[in-house]
Amino acid sequence: QKEVEQDPGPLSVPEGAIVSLNCTYSNSAFQYFMWYRQYSRKGPELLMYTYSSGNKEDGRFTAQVDKSSKYISLFIRDSQPSDSATYLCAMSADTGFQKLVFGTGTRLLVSP
Amino acid sequence: DTGVSQNPRHKITKRGQNVTFRCDPISEHNRLYWYRQTLGQGPEFLTYFQNEAQLEKSRLLSDRFSAERPKGSFSTLEIQRTEQGDSAMYLCASSLVGHPGTEAFFGQGTRLTVV
């Protein structure tokens, strides 16, 4: 069993839809939770960063962490075609960004 | 461009050859990480440096792989006697330890194809 599980998709939605992306994990030592966006043939770029449990909002993006359930989510409101990319969840037990453990990534397709 | 720079962007090599990749981190960043990403998978941690010291290596990093960061600036990742299973995207990232919330910035990666 992988430490971090993520549905690979693809997830296809129409423009304007609310998108929900999720990851589950097994290592209770994880304290730092991130969501990265990766366009084809590019490096990952950080979208959201959360420490421990709770919610964090940034524009159209909301990240939620439920440590009791070992479950994290990323919500994208008013999705745009430019949001089409692979979304990777990542976690770390150490301070900050040391030794990230990534999910497999979910491919999102937003159609106009 | 002040981001993380990786060279070359693409490398095609024959099985058994040695290859070396270079990563130039963001100038003030003291941590540098190497990850490997295969098709349809998320990046997997390989190793990281703080300044010039290599602090941790994954079990994925076989004895054919070696990474260096002389003088705590750029880093190189060398793969000796390449195998077809080494075909992947090799990603470098850097961060500034000691500054809470400072993210790790990834480079564009070096795509290796072993034929």
Image (spheres, helix red, strand yellow):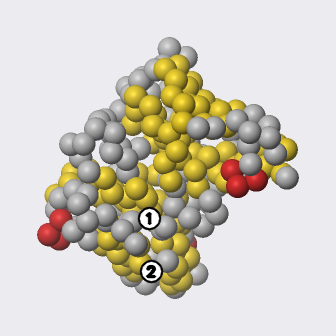
Q: Quadrant of the N terminus of chain A?
A: top right
Say above or below: A8 vs A55: below
Q: Residue furthest top?
A: A68
Left or right, A101 with reference to A83: left
Q: CA distance from mark 2 to mark 1?
A: 11 Å
Neighbor class of circle 1 (other Cα within 10 Å; few <14, some 14-19, many 20+) is many
Q: Which chain does the numbered disc 2 sit on?
A: B
Q: Earlier in the sequence, mark 2 or mark 1?
A: 2
Q: Which amino acid lies under the numbered mark 2 shown in the image of this protein?
A: Pro
**Residue B6: x, y in percent?**
41, 73
Q: Nearer the viewer, residue A99 or A32?
A: A32
Q: Secondary structure at mark 1?
A: loop
Residue displayed at 31% across by 64% down: B26
Q: Which chain does the numbered disc 1 sit on?
A: B
Left or right, A98 with reference to B14: left
Neighbor class of circle 2 (other Cα within 10 Å; few <14, some 14-19, many 20+) is some
Q: Which amino acid lies under the numbered mark 1 shown in the image of this protein?
A: Gly
**Residue A96: x, y in percent?**
33, 39
Q: Nearer the viewer, residue B67 or B64?
A: B67
Q: Residue furthest front?
A: A59
Q: Secondary structure at mark 2?
A: loop
Dot label at residue B8: 2
Determine if residue B81 is in view: no
Say above or below: B79 vs A2: below
Residue displayed at 70% across by 35% down: A77
Q: Name the residue carrying label 1.
A: B107
Front: mark 2 or 1: 1
CB-based contact (under 8 Å), mark 2 and mark 1:
no
Q: Nearer the viewer, residue A95 or A49?
A: A49
